[in-house]
Amino acid sequence: MAYWNQRTVGKRVSCTGVGLHCGKPATLTFAPAAPDSGIVFVRRDLGIELPARADMVVDTMLSTSLGAGGVRLATVEHVLAALTGMGVDNCRIEVDGPEIPILDGSAAPFVYLVQEAGVRTQRTGKRFLLLQTPVGVRHGDKVARLEPARELSIRFTVDFNHPLITDQTFEFVFSDRVFAREVARARTFGFLRDIEKMKASGLALGGSLDNAIVVDEFSILNPGGLRFPDEFVRHKVLDALGDLTLFGMPLIAKFTAYKSGHALNQALVRKVLADPTSHRVVRVTGERELEPLQIRLPALGRLDAA
């Protein structure tokens, strides 16, 4: 069933883990938020709020980081993907450190956190960003593109010139059930040859086989192997959904990417937002409004808060 009312988490829930790159422990808390407030990160240790919007992005090297006034928060994409994936529009995300905990390297722990909190339906219609004209960006052979569509769909292709990660493609029409089942559990990954260089640069200090897939020249080093045969491209889909969340509202469009990453994803978001003729924002408050818009709202299941 499609739900057009905005949603927030039903109660405060928390988890604790380490940052993938900084290696520092942090506690993350989801808290309910008012309609139209959107997703807002709160650096609880510094008292600084960072709204989840494209204009707050300050870095896209290996992850997406938000910042303002010299204060940063790194690796926001997985938790953003989880909230969007579960249909949550409004949430305060309190963090007491410089990076979102990586947990198991996927969005699944954050999905479980939403399920623990429950979801509260709010008495305000959702706002959607409807793409009106095709918009694309390219860097070398990497491409990211959005096209008008009746619903949100994602098609992603990766090719890392590696025997285990060549020409993988994954596509899906967005719903919370498909996201939770097919995308949320896909973990971040890295190549063994790059890890020492990253650590020398102050990155991946919290990385381990417990929170990332590590690949050498020929094999997967994780004892449990992969969760999906194409887990690599599924994780890139997860990352893309998190990056697209920085539009600040649910998107109705077809997203297609070839070898894209955080930088190109954000370049695409900024290009759309910079051109007011490329899109329009609509608020849906009932079923009668859907037919003239010719859109289908994402299917969202019930996670009613107690």
Image: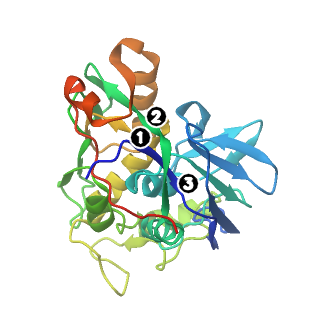
The nearer-to-camera label among 2 and 3 is 2
SS category of the residue bearing label 1: helix
Q: Earlier in the sequence, mark 1 or mark 3?
A: 3
Residue located at (52% from left, 43% from top) = 60
Residue located at (28% from left, 53% from top) = 175
Q: Nearer the viewer, residue 75 or 131?
A: 131
State left or right for residue 35 relative to residue 178: right
The residue that label 2 is drawn on is: 247
How many angstroms separate mark 1 from mark 3 (CA)? 14 Å
Picture disc at residue 136: none
How many angstroms separate mark 2 from mark 3 (CA)? 17 Å
How many angstroms separate mark 1 from mark 2 (CA)? 6 Å
The residue that label 1 is drawn on is: 244
State left or right for residue 100 relative to residue 232: right
Question: In which quarter of the view is residue 235 placed?
Answer: bottom left
Q: Residue furthest right?
A: 46
Whole-percent x and y of residue 297? Answer: 28, 41
Count of numbered tags: 3
Disc 1 residue type (three-letter): Leu
Q: Nearer the viewer, residue 206 or 16?
A: 16
Whole-percent x and y of residue 167? Answer: 17, 54
SS category of the residue bearing label 2: helix
The residue that label 3 is drawn on is: 75
SS category of the residue bearing label 3: loop
Q: Is residue 291 above or below residue 198?
A: above
Whether residues under marks 1 and 2 lie with C-beta atoms below 8 angstroms apart, the answer is yes
Residue located at (24% from left, 72% from top) = 228
